[in-house]
Amino acid sequence: MIASVATGVDLYWLPLGAGGHSVRLNGRVFEAVASRLGRREACDLYHSALEVRVPAGRYVIEQGPVSGSGRAPRGVVAEGAVGARWAGRLPIFRYEVRCWRDGIIPDVDEAVESPRPLSDDPALAERVLELAPSVPRLVWGRDELRTGEMWNSNSVISWLLARSGVDVESIRLPARGRAPGWRAGLVVARRDRLAP
């Protein structure tokens, strides 16, 4: 799914656990508990990814588990721990942020209401790519900076978009959808902009 615009930034909403049963089941359990505690209706959970097109090529930006096949083929620009900082010494408890030239978004065929064009500004698209290696390397699944939400893949994407200048307030989730961690990225991006 490549948009016809030569340069730009597109957002993809992927159902949490697309292509995998355990992540999907864990996500449903998490949302059942979270919705009950929040006294609200359960929602469909989404994971976000970006496709960025610039004159130099097409890039996919997303966060996923560390793979044992080296950094270069997937354009890994950052890594962080999952669950606890000390656990990050083991690859199974690490995530990676990918800025992958000619990369793929796994399970893109299951994306909902996607792609969502966010900008066709070449300078903004370049800025997103420049910022990717600067994503905060916070512990996945924790709220280390007291944002009110855990840090995860949605935090990485929302942080990148907010820091690059995309109008994040105009971004809407698919109907009945929720993207846990999205607000955490926005809060951290706002704090980064205000920091001296």
Image: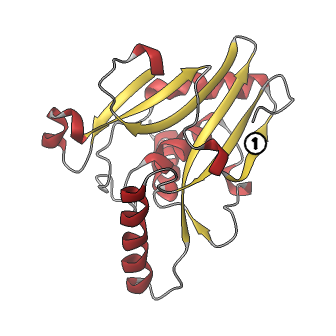
Asked if residue 151 lies left or right of residue 10, the reply is left
Asked if residue 17 lies left or right of residue 112, the reply is left
Residue 168 in sight in this render = yes
Secondary element under disc 1, as helix, strand or loop, is: strand
Q: Position of residue 176 (x, y in %)?
A: 64, 73
Foreground residue among 111 and 134: 111
Q: Position of residue 59 (x, y in %)?
A: 62, 24
Q: Residue at x 43, y 70 (%)?
A: 28
Foreground residue among 12 and 131: 12
Residue 164 vertical position relative to residue 48 in the rendered view, above or below: above
Quadrant for the C terminus, please: top left
Crowd around label 1: few <14 · some 14–19 · many ≥20 (10 Å): some
Residue 54 vertical position relative to residue 108 in the rendered view, above or below: above
Q: Residue at x 50, y 57 (%)?
A: 16
Quadrant of the image occupied by residue 160: top right
Q: Amino acid at mark 1?
A: Leu
Q: Position of residue 147 (x, y in %)?
A: 40, 59
Residue 75 in sight in this render = no
Which residue is most to the bottom?
A: 39
Q: Residue at x 73, y 49 (%)?
A: 114
**Count of all numbered marks drawn on residues in the image:** 1
Q: Residue at x 45, y 80 (%)?
A: 35
Foreground residue among 107 and 143: 107
Residue 183 vertical position relative to residue 68 in the rendered view, above or below: below
Residue 102 vertical position relative to residue 174 in the rendered view, above or below: above
Q: Position of residue 9 (x, y in %)?
A: 72, 34
Which colour scheme appears in the figure? secondary structure
Quadrant for the N terminus, please: top right
**Residue under circle 1?**
118
